[in-house]
Image: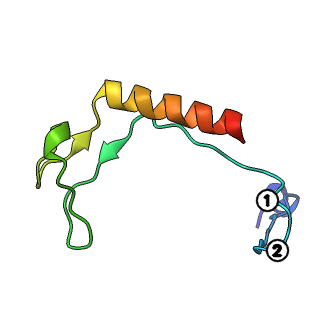
Amino acid sequence: MTEKHESRKTIVNSWNEWDPLKHVIVGRADGTMVQAPEPAMERDWTDHGFPLGTYGPLPKEMEAKANEQLDNFAKLL
């Protein structure tokens, strides 16, 4: 290893269900996609423009609504 890499420490964390919650990370829905079909998961969202077998980015209005809900969730926390 180079000297630069040796000076950095790796932080390893461990959690369990008994310790108090100290941090919460709430993500964003920006760039959300409906994944391509695969044997383990197939989406059939006909009402939202994604019938079985189609995939791609979610419509911007759905992304905006999801971000609004995530913002409200973060405020609630």
In the image, residue 51 lies at what x, y percent?
Answer: 11, 48
Residue at image coords 88%, 59%: 7
Mark 2 crowdedness (10 Å alpha carbons): few <14, some 14-19, many ≥20: few
Q: Is residue 62 left or right of residue 39?
A: right
| Marked residue nearer the N-terminal end (2 or 1) | 1
**Quarter of the rendering containing residue 32:** top left
Task: Find the distance from the CA under tag 2 to the CA under tag 1.
Answer: 35 Å
Which amino acid type corresponds to the residue marked 2 in the rendered image?
Answer: Trp
- Farthest-out residue, front: 76
| Quarter of the figure with the C terminus | top right
Mark 1 crowdedness (10 Å alpha carbons): few <14, some 14-19, many ≥20: few
In the image, residue 76 lies at what x, y percent?
Answer: 69, 38
Residue at image coords 13%, 48%: 54
Q: Nearer the viewer, residue 10 or 15?
A: 15
**Quarter of the rendering containing residue 13:** bottom right
65 to 17, vertically: above or below: above
Residue designated by label 2 = 18
Q: Nearer the viewer, residue 52 or 73?
A: 73
Q: Is residue 75 left or right of residue 7?
A: left
Which amino acid type corresponds to the residue marked 1 in the rendered image?
Answer: His
4 to 49, vertically: above or below: below
Under circle 2, the secondary element is loop
Residue at image coords 19%, 60%: 37
Choose mark 2 or mark 1, whichever is in front. 2
In the image, residue 33 lies at what x, y percent?
Answer: 32, 43
Residue designated by label 1 = 5
